[in-house]
Image (cartoon, rainbow, N blue to C red):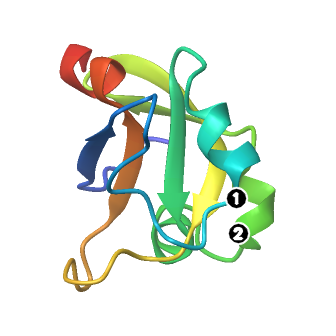
């Protein structure tokens, strides 16, 4: 819809998932192994798409630096990042973006 939102993108090791939210399920983390897969925290979902339930974001696409990514998982906000919008993906995907 043309909305611009800043996002802190964190790259995770796809084998160990070090740095992922503690509440994230194994299925959610494994979904990040797919090309273009992105995990958003639930607060970020509300900032990107105001008025929708966080679960409705699964399957939606975003464009980050001219690359399309798909929301495949949700997590709690990471401690220490405050009100920053946070997205997580595999390290190699994050570096390529």
Q: Which residue is drawn at the image coordinates 50% and 71% (left, top)?
A: 22
| Secondary structure found at label 1 | loop
Residue 79 sits in quarter: bottom left
- Say which of 24 and 38 sits in front: 24
Residue 25: numbered disc: 1
Q: Position of residue 68 (x, y in %)?
A: 48, 20
**Few, some or many residues within 10 Å of mark 1 (<14, 14–19, 20+):** some
Against 53, residue 2 (above or below) is above
Q: Which residue is drawn at the image coordinates 42% and 76% (left, top)?
A: 77
Residue 14 sits in quarter: top left
Cα–Cα gap, marks 2 and 1: 16 Å
Q: Position of residue 96 (x, y in %)?
A: 24, 14
Q: Position of residue 31 (x, y in %)?
A: 67, 33
Q: Position of residue 44 (x, y in %)?
A: 45, 68
- Quarter holding the C terminus is top left
Q: Which residue is mark 2?
A: 54
Against 53, residue 88 (above or below) is above
> Image check: 95 left or right of 4?
left
Return the disc, 2 or 1, that comes first in the chain's sequence.
1
């Amino acid at each position: 819809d043309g909305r611009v939102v800043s996002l802190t993108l964190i790259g995770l090791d796809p084998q160990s998932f070090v740095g992922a939210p503690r509440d994230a399920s194994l299925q959610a983390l494994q979904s990040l192994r797919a090309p273009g897969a992105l995990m958003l925290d639930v607060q970020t979902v509300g900032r990107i798409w105001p008025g929708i339930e966080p679960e409705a974001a699964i399957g939606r696409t975003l464009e980050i630096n001219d690359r399309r990514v798909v929301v495949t998982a949700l997590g709690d906000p990471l401690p220490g990042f405050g009100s920053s919008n946070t997205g997580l993906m595999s390290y190699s995907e994050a570096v390529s973006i």
